[in-house]
Image (spheres, rainbow, N blue to C red):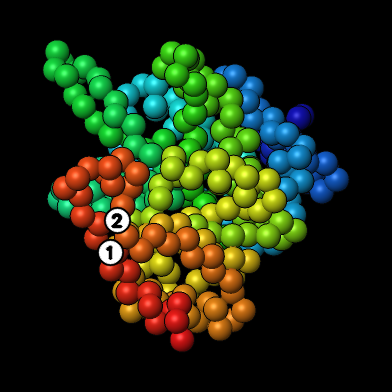
Amino acid sequence: MVNWKQSKKVGDLLLVANSIMLVLLINGLGQFYFSRLDITEEKRYTIKSETKELLNKLEDDVFVEVFLEGDLNPGFKRFQKSIKEALDEFRIYSNNKINFVFTDPNQAVGEKARNEFMSDLAAKGISAMNVIDTKDGQRIEKFVFPGALVSTGGFETGVMLLKGSRTQGAQETLNQSIENVEFELANAIYKLANTQRKKIALVKGHGELDSLQIASFNSALSEQYDVFQLELSRKNTVPDYQALIIAKPRSEFSETDKYKLDQYIMRGGKILFMLDRLDASMDSASSENYFAFSYELNLEDQLFK
């Protein structure tokens, strides 16, 4: 007579044993072979071999703060999702050296705080976009910051993730930017992690020339150097840049900022001061009633010792 209870028990034990063996087999294979299945709709994140190599060789942790969070329209939600998918892949291939967070810039409380936040991002190369949507029959206007701040080893750089030409439509710009997410993020990480090219910084925070005014100058520098933006008030010490450039400041340097510059020079740092002593432009100087005023920069003791 067959003991069905005993037979069922033996069958259950065999099933458990086989399951364990299968898990062990898959685990063992995983030691020799690693691959990522791309399950995104557009098959974007089979990331390039060059990016994988860059991420695999990272020595320091990299932090990425993406300023795309909150109440977003469907297009920007899709853009946000593509950025997160890319960063998830970056984290895996970097052995968890990539860390990231999404921040809502509109959470800054009060108009003054929001304006300061926007100015700070703009100084780092992350510009606001004015987006107009219609919701429940009402016109809604909102600022969106489609960029990220990437930092590692005491250095940081801003990167605009939404890019396009004026001839492109909004949807075309969005689609192109989604395709370029990997390149833009990887390029920013490479710029920070690359120790071969020398790093220089443009000092900001004292009314210096903005990015548009020195675009060609910046472009020429970028051929030989990695160029960063440095706001002295946000750093306890100046990082070890090869050189600093102060281009036409128009407001006073605080004693704290001057101390940071002095300490940087004492460590062997170099500073190129590009100063105008008078508030005078060619257009305004042609007027009969024009008076030139000197800029009070508080830099005399830095320049004449």
The answer to whether one can see residue 103 in this image is no
Q: Secondary structure at mark 1?
A: strand
Q: CA distance from mark 1 to mark 2?
A: 6 Å
Q: Position of residue 4 (x, y in %)?
A: 69, 31
Q: Is residue 282 above or below residue 7?
A: below
Depth order, front residue of 149/30: 149
Q: Mark 1 — residue?
A: 294
What's under tag 1, amino acid-wise? Ser
Residue depicted at x 32% and y 24%: 73
Residue depicted at x 62% and y 49%: 221
Local packing at callout 2 (Cα closer than 10 Å; few below 14, some 14-19, many 20+) is few
Residue depicted at x 21% and y 27%: 141
Local packing at callout 1 (Cα closer than 10 Å; few below 14, some 14-19, many 20+) is few
Question: Dots 1 and 2: beta carbons under 8 Å?
Answer: yes
Depth order, front residue of 263/131: 263
Q: Quadrant of the N terminus?
A: top right
The answer to whether one can see residue 273 in this image is yes
Indicate which disc residue 97 carries: none
Q: Is residue 216 above or below residue 190?
A: above
What's under tag 2, amino acid-wise? Asp
Q: Position of residue 111 (x, y in %)?
A: 16, 48
Indicate which disc residue 279 carries: 2
Q: Secondary structure at mark 2?
A: strand
Depth order, front residue of 243/150: 243
